[in-house]
Image: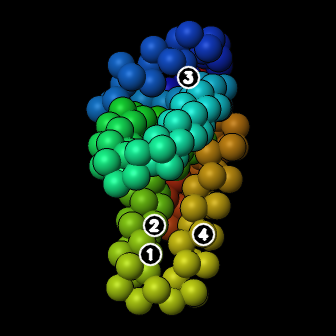
Amino acid sequence: MHNSFEQEPSFKESLLNFWKKTFDYSGVSKVSEYWWIIIVTGIIEFISIFVLLANVFENGSAGKITAYIILGIVALFIGLPSISLSVRRLRDAGLSNLGISLCYVLLILCNIFWNFDKATYVQYINSIFGLIIFYVSLRPTDNYVTDQKSGWRSKVFRHAEIKK
């Protein structure tokens, strides 16, 4: 059961949970856990890109192949756990499974349409959906829970738990 009064995880716990919960889309991730990982993965990605660009400039086309392989490995190593972390973070903020699914389906559809059309407005819509997901992930625990039993809010947001 979701408990909004749990203690925030430490840096070490956050890192361990990031990889241990790679395929765990249930549960929640606290704000601090989310941000520790965003900072660490950002640093890893920055260093990877910097080193790989240096490799490409030094080794030419052979460096490009190596760079693509290493970037693919880094993307899998960081990308898969990041998706589940983001889903757990959105759930902690108060979105239901349907709300989380809608966010990602709309983001994916915008990316698909942009690849076919390259229209600027699709890029703007994609950016807006990305910013909405980012904003919601910044919100505190249970920020978007609802006590409504019907209507769109009851489907998109998690129901408030009754404290006894």
Q: For numbered disc 3, what is the local secondary structure?
A: loop
Image coordinates of residue 80 in percent, x first then y, are 35, 39
Residue annotated with mark 3 = 3
Q: Which amino acid does label 3 sit on?
A: Asn
Nearest to N terminus: mark 2 or mark 3? 3
Residue annotated with mark 1 = 110
Task: Calculate the distance from the C-alpha at mark 1 to the C-alpha at mark 4.
Answer: 9 Å
Instruction: Tell me whether the residue at label 4 lies in contact with that at label 3, contact meaning CB atoms closer than 8 angstroms.
Output: no
Task: Calculate the distance from the C-alpha at mark 2 to the C-alpha at mark 4.
Answer: 9 Å
Residue annotated with mark 4 = 127
Nearer to the camera, 32 or 160: 32
Closer to viewer: mark 1 or mark 3: 1
Nearer to the camera, 100 or 69: 69
Nearer to the camera, 152 or 55: 55
124 shown above or below 146: below
136 shown above or below 66: below
In the image, is 30 to the left or to the right of 159?
right
Instruction: Tell me whether the residue at label 2 lies in contact with that at label 4, contact meaning CB atoms closer than 8 angstroms.
Output: no
Residue at 39% over, 57% down: 101
Nearer to the camera, 111 or 48: 48
Nearest to N terminus: mark 4 or mark 3? 3
Image coordinates of residue 132 in percent, x first then y, are 63, 61
Q: In which quarter of the image is the N terminus?
A: top left
In the image, is 24 to the left or to the right of 37?
left
Q: What residue type is labelled 4?
A: Ser
